[in-house]
Amino acid sequence: MKFLFITSSNIACNPRLFKELQLALKLGHSCSVIQFQLGNWTDSKTNLLKKSLHNVQFIEFTALRNPFFQWFYTSLIQKILSFLPQTNLPIRLLAFSLSKRSIIINRFLKNNWGQYDWVIAHNPPSFYPALVFSLKIRAKLGIDIEDYHPGETNDLKESRKMLRMMKTIMPKADYCSFAAPLIKEEVQKFITHEFKEWVTILNGFSKDEFNEPTEIKSKKLKVVWFSQNIAPGRGLEKFISVANKLHKEIELHLIGDLSEKNKNLLLKYSKGVFIHLPMTQRDLHGFLSQFDVGLAVETSKDLNNSIAVSNKILAYVQSGLYVIATPTPGQLSFLGGSNLNFSIVDLSDIEIEKCFSKLIKDKPKLIHKKLQFQRAKKFSWENINESLINIWGN
């Protein structure tokens, strides 16, 4: 079969798409990908990942201001549409008002046919173009909901627009996949049609990307956190403060892109904090084995942040790391229903210091990396992708 995957980002910052692409290739399918150059570190990482994907056709657009006419035209259209009352906009214009990348993708697909059995959309700007194209070529449509998109903003107008688009498009898909149970539940509150294939597929990773845990000889408690960007407002400030206070007993390692401005805001005069540049997914997962504890810090800054199960929490447990998590509904739901080793802490210096001190004191007793590694095997991509295999094969 022939697959067309569509994303408004790229495969480096969308590990979920990358895993699906690898799975489709492993199953013997032919694959094409529409993606964007973003003008940041993900472009070079995407180029590295592309080398591992043989015989995949990549169709790439730019999200930058060059070519200027494309940027100016799509920006102008989106801006004009954003001022119009969303209730009166047809779904096509509603989608364009949400993202200029939707305009770019749709214009390309309108002028190209191609023969595909499946069109699979990742990220909201791809939803409408994917629907129209799948109908045009009579292909099946898959939509991946990695986040609860209406809840990614506190702007009520934008949230309503996103929800209306999803309510219109998702019932027309042959399947929808969700990255967390609570995200699926939230969507089902508003989309009440008879569901076809709606499946929850956590963001687990391939078991081959993780090293068998070994005993860490360092007497210090080695703690890690990662994301695409290291920035204020993500709950790190409290952990950095406590790590600075306990720097003789703790190392806090942060992995991600760190600007000079954010470095000054977060790390001025801090001790015991180490910075690492962004890594490819495989390199990151291999690197995590060097640590004892992973920080799953979420601030509940919006509804999506509250109910999501992040990539990082799955990467930690698959590496065998003990998890310190903040009490969001998504993380409580995931950890509470598992037999994993974890602690839940509020974002307060007192609670964090208490948790760290307990782990430092009872490190051999509390941190069982090999046991965590074994228990987390059930979350590996190989164990959770069966539902996709079954859907694609129908």
Image: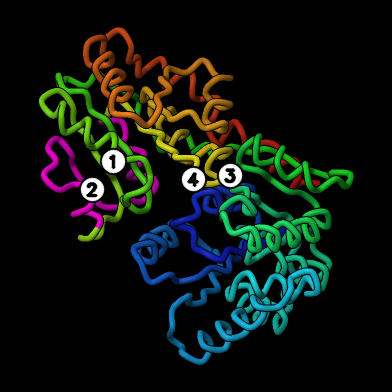
Q: Do the residues labelled 2 and 1 touch (CB within 8 Å)?
A: yes
> For residue 301, which numbered disc appears in the image?
4
For residue 123, side relative to residue 255 (left or right): right
Looking at the image, tell me whether mark 2 or mark 1 is earlier in sequence order: 1
Count neighbours of disc 3 (C-alpha within 10 A) and say few if under 14, some if 14 to 19, many if 20 or more.
Answer: many
Looking at the image, tell me whether mark 1 or mark 3 is earlier in sequence order: 1
Marks 1/4: CA–CA distance: 15 Å
> For residue 257, which numbered disc appears in the image?
none
**Region of the chain picked out in magenta, as a range:** 262-290
For residue 78, side relative to residue 274 (left or right): right
Circle 2 is placed at which residue position? Answer: 266
Q: Are marks 1 and 3 in contact (CB under 8 Å)?
A: no
Circle 1 is placed at which residue position? Answer: 237
Q: Are marks 3 and 4 in contact (CB under 8 Å)?
A: no
Q: What amino acid is labelled 2 in the image?
A: Leu
User: Residue shown at 27%/13% (left/top)?
Assistant: 358
Secondary structure of the residue carrying tag 4 is: loop
Say whether residue 274 is magenta: yes
**Residue 162 coordinates in the image, percent (x, y):** 68, 60
Q: What amino acid is labelled 4 in the image?
A: Lys
Say whether residue 221 is magenta: no
Q: What amino acid is labelled 3 in the image?
A: Leu
Secondary structure of the residue carrying tag 3 is: helix
